[in-house]
Image (cartoon, rainbow, N blue to C red):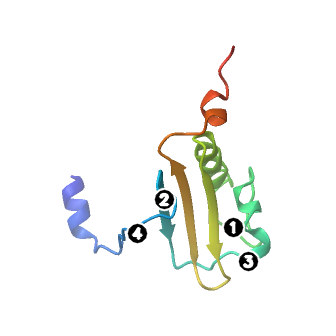
Amino acid sequence: MWERRAAAQPSTTERRRQNVSQPNAVKVSVSDTGPGIAAEFHLEVFDDFFRLPGTANQEGMGLGLAIARRLVQGMGGKIWVESEVGAGCKFSFLIPYKPAIAAASKGKNR
């Protein structure tokens, strides 16, 4: 079933491999060609229940990026967005191969 679905849709994804300046980490980036995000919202988009102004009629609760932020930070990583209005978005996260001691011991009782 998945094979038929994949064959029926043209592939619009692009994969690139790039060396990271952080040698003991993996960086993942996802970009789109949507309407973009204004610079004043680059930090807020990772807040719980945050929705961009003018998107009230679109689906979603504003939790996806907040959950992604928690997961990435829980592994000792960083997440950010690069975007301009009208030019799409590029979301990236960097996760260390071996998390920092503070991140690894978070939540453990002693």
Circle 2 residues within 10 Å: few <14, some 14–19, many ≥20: some
Is 55 placed left or right of 97 in the picture?
Answer: right
Residue matched to label 1:
57
Quick check: 76 above or below 56?
Answer: above
| Disc 2 from disc 4: Cα separation | 9 Å
**From where the camera sits, is residue 59 visible?**
no
At label 2, the amino acid type is Lys
Q: Seen from this angle, which residue lies furthest bottom?
A: 86
Residue matched to label 2:
27
At label 4, the amino acid type is Gln
| Disc 4 from disc 1: Cα separation | 37 Å
Residue 69 lies, in percent from the top left, at: 64, 50
In primary-sequence order, the first of circles 1 and 2 is 2
Per the rendering, the mark at residue 109 is none
| Disc 3 from disc 2: Cα separation | 23 Å
At label 3, the amino acid type is Ala
Q: Do the residues labelled 3 and 1 touch (CB within 8 Å)?
A: no
Q: Which of marks 4 and 3 is in front?
A: 4
Residue 3 lies, in percent from the top left, at: 19, 57
Q: Nearer the viewer, mark 3 or mark 2?
A: 2
Residue 109 lies, in percent from the top left, at: 68, 16
At label 1, the amino acid type is Asn
| Disc 3 from disc 1: Cα separation | 19 Å
Residue matched to label 3:
38
Residue matched to label 4:
18
